[in-house]
Image (cartoon, helix red, strand yellow):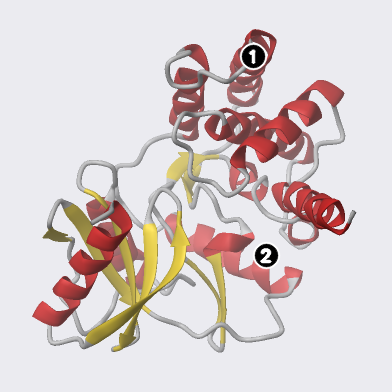
């Protein structure tokens, strides 16, 4: 039995123990965490190996944000708000929402993110800083055993860029607050209740421009009082960090190596710094054109 099969079995077992019928599981996403839609109970389950997640942090933060009315996916109300441990996996259960069309507009996306940031200023929970994310990326780059296929010249490029961007951003002395950490389109649900954010495991403290560096350009245009210089630095930082993670041994991101190569090319090429959704669309178009030819 492979890990995905075991994780699905753990989630369905947890649901059954709570009298939530889960005869089937639809895989919605499989990267650092497995995301499932359990049916017919219609529960959104997130599963990760114990010790490789911050599930309790997510649950605690979700409860606080729900209490202050933040636009985020709430925990499943039919289950106890806690982390369920089963067969070496940490399982959390969330409310499932059907996706609606049209997808979230830039105006609504920006408004929801601003509301989330407002709610996050009202909660009190110890959290890491955005600089800790930089450290994680630096550790991948510095260890050839963790990134064996990263060329020496690219290793030097990433190491130097991550260090200089850390100094530059921290040197600005911008106001920091609790952030989502990765509020990209993949972590935004388009629902009949409006846009809702999911995946709180990357929450950290930092300037709001760090969050904005993960969203489409059009969204930033509708977010108030953005420091454009800081946003540009944060966009470059996100490109460098994501590039480092795509070269980590065992990375599960679809077409991750191709993505990593493109991000390195962008860092060598210089500004203007594109948003990640632009890079992904560009690679998808390239992949389709290659299939046609």
Return the mark for residue 142: none
Label 1 Cα crowd, 10 Å radius (few <14 / some 14-19 / many 20+): few
Quarter occupied by residue 256: top right
For the residue pair 289 and 211, the one nearer the viewer reads as 289
Q: Is residue 267 left or right of residue 20?
A: right
Label 2 Cα crowd, 10 Å radius (few <14 / some 14-19 / many 20+): many
Residue 234: tell me if it is visible. Answer: no
Q: Is residue 277 left or right of residue 64?
A: right
For the residue pair 105 and 209, the one nearer the viewer reads as 105
Q: Secondary structure at mark 1?
A: loop
Q: Position of residue 292 (x, y in %)?
A: 87, 59
Question: Vertical placement of 58 versus 261: above or below?
Answer: below
For the residue pair 58 and 31, the one nearer the viewer reads as 31
For the residue pair 3 and 49, the one nearer the viewer reads as 3
At a point 71% along the width and 47% down the height, the residue shown is 276
The residue at which mark 1 appears reads as: 151
Q: Position of residue 152 (x, y in %)?
A: 63, 8
Q: Is residue 121 left or right of residue 127?
A: right
> Where, quadrant-wise, is the N terminus in this rendering?
bottom left
Q: Is residue 19 left or right of residue 139?
A: left
Q: Nearer the viewer, mark 1 or mark 2?
A: 1
Q: Position of residue 183 (x, y in %)?
A: 56, 56
The residue at which mark 2 appears reads as: 110
């Amino acid at each position: 039995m492979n890990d995905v099969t075991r994780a699905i079995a753990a989630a369905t077992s947890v649901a059954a123990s709570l009298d939530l019928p889960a005869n089937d599981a639809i895989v919605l996403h499989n990267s650092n965490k497995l995301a499932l839609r359990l049916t017919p109970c219609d529960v959104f389950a997130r599963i990760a190996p114990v010790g490789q997640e911050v599930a309790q942090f997510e649950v605690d933060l979700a409860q606080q944000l729900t209490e202050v009315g933040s636009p985020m996916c709430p925990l499943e109300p039919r289950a106890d708000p806690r982390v369920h441990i089963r067969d070496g996996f940490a399982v959390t259960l969330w409310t499932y929402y059907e996706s609606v069309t049209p997808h979230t507009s830039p105006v609504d996306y920006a408004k929801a993110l601003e509301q989330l940031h407002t709610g996050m200023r009202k909660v009190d929970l110890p959290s890491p800083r955005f600089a800790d994310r930089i450290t994680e990326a630096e550790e991948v780059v510095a260890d050839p055993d963790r990134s064996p296929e990263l060329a020496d010249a690219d290793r030097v490029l990433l190491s130097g860029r991550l260090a200089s961007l850390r100094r530059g951003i921290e040197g600005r002395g911008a106001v920091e607050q609790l952030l989502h950490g990765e509020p990209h389109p993949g972590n935004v649900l388009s629902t009949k209740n409006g846009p809702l954010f999911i995946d709180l495991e990357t929450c950290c403290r930092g300037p709001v421009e760090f969050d904005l560096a993960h969203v489409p350009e059009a969204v930033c245009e509708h977010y108030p009082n953005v420091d454009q210089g800081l946003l540009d630095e944060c966009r470059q930082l996100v490109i460098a960090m994501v590039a480092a993670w795509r070269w980590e041994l065992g990375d599960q991101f679809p077409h991750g190596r191709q993505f990593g190569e493109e991000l390195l090319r962008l860092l060598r090429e210089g500004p203007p710094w594109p948003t990640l959704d632009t890079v992904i669309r560009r690679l998808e178009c390239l992949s389709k054109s290659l299939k046609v030819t």
